[in-house]
């Protein structure tokens, strides 16, 4: 996926009225740029509970873009465990 396609995907999924609980984009070669582009829109997706970006070559810069998703106000009371899956998956760990 191109950076611009990931930016559009993130922006679209962050629109009001879209309910997205789980997004799995493992093994897509997103890299830091892709993670940054995707997560900029996902910040406005409060229903997101799990995001898996495992095995995408995401380093510290991409992880920094993913980190704010851990602190998003949730639409439902999902608890911190669901949010911690986001950060672990960004580095390729199974969590």
Image (cartoon, rainbow, N blue to C red):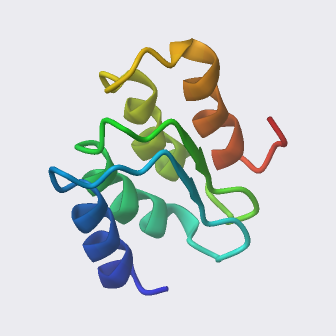
Position of 12 with respect to 61 (left or right) is: left
| Residue visible at 38% across and 62% down in the picture | 38
Horizontally, is 17 left or right of 7 in the view?
left
Q: Which residue is drawn at 81% across and 43% down?
A: 93
In the image, residue 94 sits, relative to residue 40, either above or below, namely above
Query: In terms of depth relative to the viewer, which is nearer, 56 or 84?
Result: 84
Q: Which residue lies furthest to the left in this view?
A: 16
Where residue 1 appears, as percent x and y from the top left, is 49, 85
Task: Find residue 9 and report its horizontal and vertical position in percent.
Answer: 33, 72
Give the answer, above or below, for where 7 lies relative to 17.
below
Residue 61 picture location, percent across and down: 48, 49
Residue depicted at x 46% and y 69%: 34
Q: In this view, does 85 lie to the left or right of 20?
A: right
Q: Position of residue 69 (x, y in %)?
A: 40, 34
Q: Which residue is drawn at 69% across and 45% down?
A: 89
**Image quadrant where residue 95 sits:** top right
């Amino acid at each position: 996926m191109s950076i611009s396609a990931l930016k559009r995907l993130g922006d679209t999924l962050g629109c009001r009225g879209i309910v997205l609980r789980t997004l799995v984009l493992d093994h897509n070669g997103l890299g830091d740029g892709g993670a940054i582009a995707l997560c900029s829109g996902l910040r406005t997706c409060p229903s997101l509970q799990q995001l898996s970006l495992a095995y995408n070559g995401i380093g510290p810069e991409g992880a920094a873009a993913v980190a704010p998703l851990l602190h998003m106000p949730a639409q439902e009371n999902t608890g911190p465990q669901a949010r911690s899956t986001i950060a672990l998956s960004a580095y390729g760990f199974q969590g």
